[in-house]
Amino acid sequence: MNRTRIKQTFAEYTNQYNASDPKIRLKIDHTYRVAALAERIAKTVTDISVDEDLAWTMGMLHDIGRFEQVKRYGTFVDSESIDHAELGITILFEDGLLTQFGDFTPEEQELLKVSIENHNKYKIPEGMSAEKTAYCNILRDADKIDIFRVNCDTPLEDIYNVSTAELKQAAVSDSVKKCFMEKHTVLRSLKHTPVDNLVGHVCLVFELVYPISVQIAKEQGYVDKLMRFASDNPDTNAWLSYMRKHLWNS
Ligand SMILES: [Fe+2]
């Protein structure tokens, strides 16, 4: 794998889109970060042999569908537009963009395909080989870690599409609190208030597969910053303080 060629092809491809659009810029930055994170996680995997270059490449290609998605639909919300992972697969494998990034063996192509396709799914398919499962998990961990940063750097009002007053007054639903206490992620259907979304984002920590991923998420401090959200609702503040005490102890 030739990283220079991959970076150059990525730059050329994304240059066709409007980099002054903050949405495009965000995804370009996200791509480089996810690639670096995937490589860092891959280095710690010891139970099976993982190619760090391939892990980095997966990160570089995982959101390639985002650019066309935002151009066509003006949104990153898959449910309102298109599954951006599937769109990426079409662009890379059917339209042939992958060949411009390099010559990949059939095995590498299969690993790229399966990991990109599953990076945004609620769960990965059961019964996959240990190798495929590892690549999927590496990419999913890397993506989640950088989502914590994005959610911290973007005003919560913009992410959840609510006014500051609504956000500050919101309470956490009991069903969402239960998910946190049971240490798992929150299904979309359970989220009813703006702070439910915030708790839901914090709960992504429970889905991280590799110990290094939890360590990186903790080190980066973005999850802690999310939990320091200053609510005007006393119950919400008490709940956030409970979360800060319990999140990292397991
Ligand atoms: Fe994605």
Image (cartoon, rainbow, N blue to C red):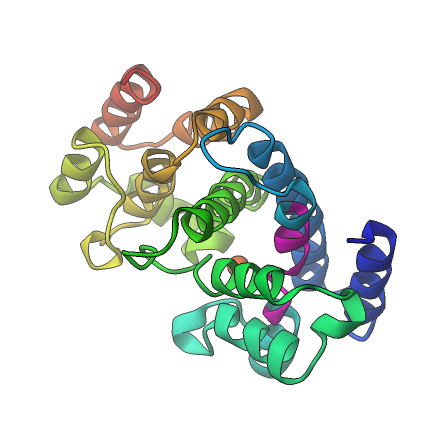
Q: Is residue 226 left or right of residue 29?
A: left
Judge by depth and name the residue closer to the eye, 11 or 44.
Answer: 44
Q: Position of residue 68 (x, y in %)?
A: 64, 77
Q: Is residue 60 left or right of residue 18?
A: left
Q: Position of residue 123 (x, y in %)?
A: 31, 55
Judge by depth and name the residue closer to the eye, 135 or 82.
Answer: 135
**Which residue is located at x 23 percent, y 32 percent?**
183
Judge by depth and name the residue closer to the eye, 36 or 191.
Answer: 36
Residue 208, by quadrant, is top left
Q: Is residue 171 magenta?
A: no
- Can residue 19 be seen? no
Which stretch is magenta? 56-65
- Can residue 173 be seen? yes
Main SS of the magenta part reads helix
Q: Is residue 61 magenta?
A: yes
Q: Position of residue 247 (x, y in %)?
A: 32, 22
Q: Position of residue 192 (x, y in %)?
A: 22, 54
Q: Quadrant of the C terminus?
A: top left
Give the tally of numbered discs. 0
Classify 110 as above or below 247: below
Classify 68 as above or below 182: below
**Which residue is located at x 24 percent, y 26 percent?**
239
Classify 237 as above or below 249: below
**Which residue is located at x 31 percent, y 59 percent?**
125
